[in-house]
Image (cartoon, rainbow, N blue to C red):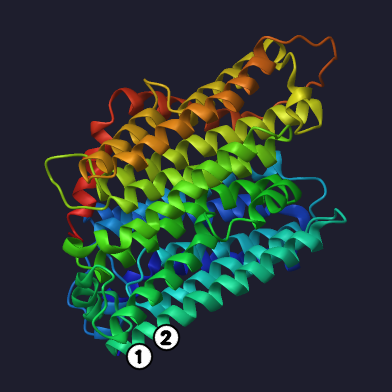
C-alpha cells in the first residue's frame, strides 16, 4: 500500500500535472476569461513551495515502504536543488507569458497544458535513478514540445515540429539501444547497480573480451542520445531551425529549462554508474564532443544576423563549455573542479540566458524584428532594457564581475587540474571567438544611431524578471561563494 511519505516524493510533479488539467478544464468551462499563463504560474509556484520545503527539510520523507519508488526516484538535495532551479526558470517564463506570447500562437490553453506536462517530465529527469524511467521522462519532455512547436500559425511550424520529431525519435532509439545493451551485460537498469562499468572501464580501451567493448559502446550510445536534449554534437542540427522558427516562449524554454534538465540526468547517470577512479577512460569521448560543439557553435554564430538563430548557435557552444566540466568530472572537496563547477555553471547559464532571451524578446517588439541590424539606436530610446541585455551578454561572454565569468573560471580550472589543459585552452579560445558577436550586438544597440520612431509598449512583468536576473548576474559574479556553498551541500548527498 502506498503511504503518504511515498506520495510526498512526487508531490511537486503531481501539482504540475494537476494544474495542467485545471488549465484545460478552465478553458472548456470559462473560455478566455481566465489567463492560462496565470494558472500555469500558480501551479508552478505551488510546486516550487513544496520543493523548497523538501530541500530545507521542513517536510521530511522517511519510512519509505516501497523499495521500487525509493530506487527509481531520488529525493536527495541534488535533485531538489535542480528542481528548484527548473521551477524558478519556468515560473519566470509563465509569469511573462501574457506579455511576450506570440500573436501567431493558436490554442493558447493547449499550449500551456503541453508546457506543464513537459515541465513535469523535466522535473522527473532531475530525480530519476533508473534507466527505463529516465527514458520515459525524456519522452515526456519531448512529445509535448512537438505539439507546442506545431501550434504556431506560421507556415513552417509543421516543418520544424516534424524535424524535431524525427531527431527526437532517433536520439530516443539510440538511448534505448544503449540501455538494452547495458541491461543485457549487467542485469540491472538502476544507475548504482550497473556493476560491470566499474570493472570493464579499467582496461583503457585494451579489451580482454567483447563484453568490455560492448559496455564502452553502450555508454557512447547513451551519451550521444543525450546530446539531443542538451543541444550538443552530434544531435544539434535541429537547434538553429527550431529556435528561429518556433514561438519565442518555446525557444526560451528549450534554451534554458530543457538544457538544465538534460544535463542533470546526464551528470547523475555518469556519476552513479561509473567509478570515478576510471572515469578518465570515457572522458576523452566527452571532451571531443565538447570541442566540436564549442567550435561549431561559435564559428557559425559569427555569420548570423538573426538573433534567435545566433542564440541557437550560442547555446550549442555553451553546451560545449558545460561538457568541459563533465569531461573533467572528479571529487575534490578542496577545489572548485569537477561536478561542483559543472552544476554552478549550469545554474549560472540558466539565469544569464533567461535574462538575455527575455531582454531580446522585449527589444524585438519595438522593432518588430529579430535581425540585429534593426536594433540600431535602441540603446538611447530603450536604455534600461538595453543595459540589462548588455549585462547578460557580457556574462555569456565571461567578462569579470559577472556570474558567467566565475562559472567559466571554475570550469576551466577544473579541466586544467584534471590534466585537460588542451580542453581548457579550447574553451578560452572559443570565449574569445564569441566576444566578436556578443560585442557586435552591444555596438549596434548603443553606438549606431537610428531615426526610426519606436512604438510605446510596456512590459512591466518582464521588466521585473529581467531586473532580478541582472542583479543575480552581478551579485553572484561578485560573491559566488553563496551559490557555490549551496551547490556543494546539495552534491554531498550523492557523493
Q: Residues within 10 Å of mark 1 (few under 14, many from 20)?
A: few
User: At which x and y percent is residue 102?
Assistant: 76, 45
Expressed as whole percent of the image width and height from the top left, the position of residue 349 reads 45, 40
Between 315 and 451, the residue placed more toward the observer is: 315
Q: Nearer the viewer, residue 167 or 357?
A: 167
Q: Is residue 85 visible?
A: yes
Above or below, 172 against 448 in this view is: below
Q: Would you say the residues marked 2 and 1 are in contact, meaning their CB atoms lie under 8 Å apart? A: yes
The residue positioned 25% from the left and 41% from the top of the image is 414
Which residue position holds label 1?
184
Q: Secondary structure at mark 2?
A: helix
Q: Residue at x 37, y 72 (%)?
A: 219
Estimate the x, y position of residue 110 in percent, counting from the top left: 71, 64
Tell me how far mark 2 sits from mark 1, CA to CA. Answer: 6 Å
Residue that carries the numbered disc 2 in the rendered image: 180
Element assignment for label 1 = helix
Amino acid at each position: 500500500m502506498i503511504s503518504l511519505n511515498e506520495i510526498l516524493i512526487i508531490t511537486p510533479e503531481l501539482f504540475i500535472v494537476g494544474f495542467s488539467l485545471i488549465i484545460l478544464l478552465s478553458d472548456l468551462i470559462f473560455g478566455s476569461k481566465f489567463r492560462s499563463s496565470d494558472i500555469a504560474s500558480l501551479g508552478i509556484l505551488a510546486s516550487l513551495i513544496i520543493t523548497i520545503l523538501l530541500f530545507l527539510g521542513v517536510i521530511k520523507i522517511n519510512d519509505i515502504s516501497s523499495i521500487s519508488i525509493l530506487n527509481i526516484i531520488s529525493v536527495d538535495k541534488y535533485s531538489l536543488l535542480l528542481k528548484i532551479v527548473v521551477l524558478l526558470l519556468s515560473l519566470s517564463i509563465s509569469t511573462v507569458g501574457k506579455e511576450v506570447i506570440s500573436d501567431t500562437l493558436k490554442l493558447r490553453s493547449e499550449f500551456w497544458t503541453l508546457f506543464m506536462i513537459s515541465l513535469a517530465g523535466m522535473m522527473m529527469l532531475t530525480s530519476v535513478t533508473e534507466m527505463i524511467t529516465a527514458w520515459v521522462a525524456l519522452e515526456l519532455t519531448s512529445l509535448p514540445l512537438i505539439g507546442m512547436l506545431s501550434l504556431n500559425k506560421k507556415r513552417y511550424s509543421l516543418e520544424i515540429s516534424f524535424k524535431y520529431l524525427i531527431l527526437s525519435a532517433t536520439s530516443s532509439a539510440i538511448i534505448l539501444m544503449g540501455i538494452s545493451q547495458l541491461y543485457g551485460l549487467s542485469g540491472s537498469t538502476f544507475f548504482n547497480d550497473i556493476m560491470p562499468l566499474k570493472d570493464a572501464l579499467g582496461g583503457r580501451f585494451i579489451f580482454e573480451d567483447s563484453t568490455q567493448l560492448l559496455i564502452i559502446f553502450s555508454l557512447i550510445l547513451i551519451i550521444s542520445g543525450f546530446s539531443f536534449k542538451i543541444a550538443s554534437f552530434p544531435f544539434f542540427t535541429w537547434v538553429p531551425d527550431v529556435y528561429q522558427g518556433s514561438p519565442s516562449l518555446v525557444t526560451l524554454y528549450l534554451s534554458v529549462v530543457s538544457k538544465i534538465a538534460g544535463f542533470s540526468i546526464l551528470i547523475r547517470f555518469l556519476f552513479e554508474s561509473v567509478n570515478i577512479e576510471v572515469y578518465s577512460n570515457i572522458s576523452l569521448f566527452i571532451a571531443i564532443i565538447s570541442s566540436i560543439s564549442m567550435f561549431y557553435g561559435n564559428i557559425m554564430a559569427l555569420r548570423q544576423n538573426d538573433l534567435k538563430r545566433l542564440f541557437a548557435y550560442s547555446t550549442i557552444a555553451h553546451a560545449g563549455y558545460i561538457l568541459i566540466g563533465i569531461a573533467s568530472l572528479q571529487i575534490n572537496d578542496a577545489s572548485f573542479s569537477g561536478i561542483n563547477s559543472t552544476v554552478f555553471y549550469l545554474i549560472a547559464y540558466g539565469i544569464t540566458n533567461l535574462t538575455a532571451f527575455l531582454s531580446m524578446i522585449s527589444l524585438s517588439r519595438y522593432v518588430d524584428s529579430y535581425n540585429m541590424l534593426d536594433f540600431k539606436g535602441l540603446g538611447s530610446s530603450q536604455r534600461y532594457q538595453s543595459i540589462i541585455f548588455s549585462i547578460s551578454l557580457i556574462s555569456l561572454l565571461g567578462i569579470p564581475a559577472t556570474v558567467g565569468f566565475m562559472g567559466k573560471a571554475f570550469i576551466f580550472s577544473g579541466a586544467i587540474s584534471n590534466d585537460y589543459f588542451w580542453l581548457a585552452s579550447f574553451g578560452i579560445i572559443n570565449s574569445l571567438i564569441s566576444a566578436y558577436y556578443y560585442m557586435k550586438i552591444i555596438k549596434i544597440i548603443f553606438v549606431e544611431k537610428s531615426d526610426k520612431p519606436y512604438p510605446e509598449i510596456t512590459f512591466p512583468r518582464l521588466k521585473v524578471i529581467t531586473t532580478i536576473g541582472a542583479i543575480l548576474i552581478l551579485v553572484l559574479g561578485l560573491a559566488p561563494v553563496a551559490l557555490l556553498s549551496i551547490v556543494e551541500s546539495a552534491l554531498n548527498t550523492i557523493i
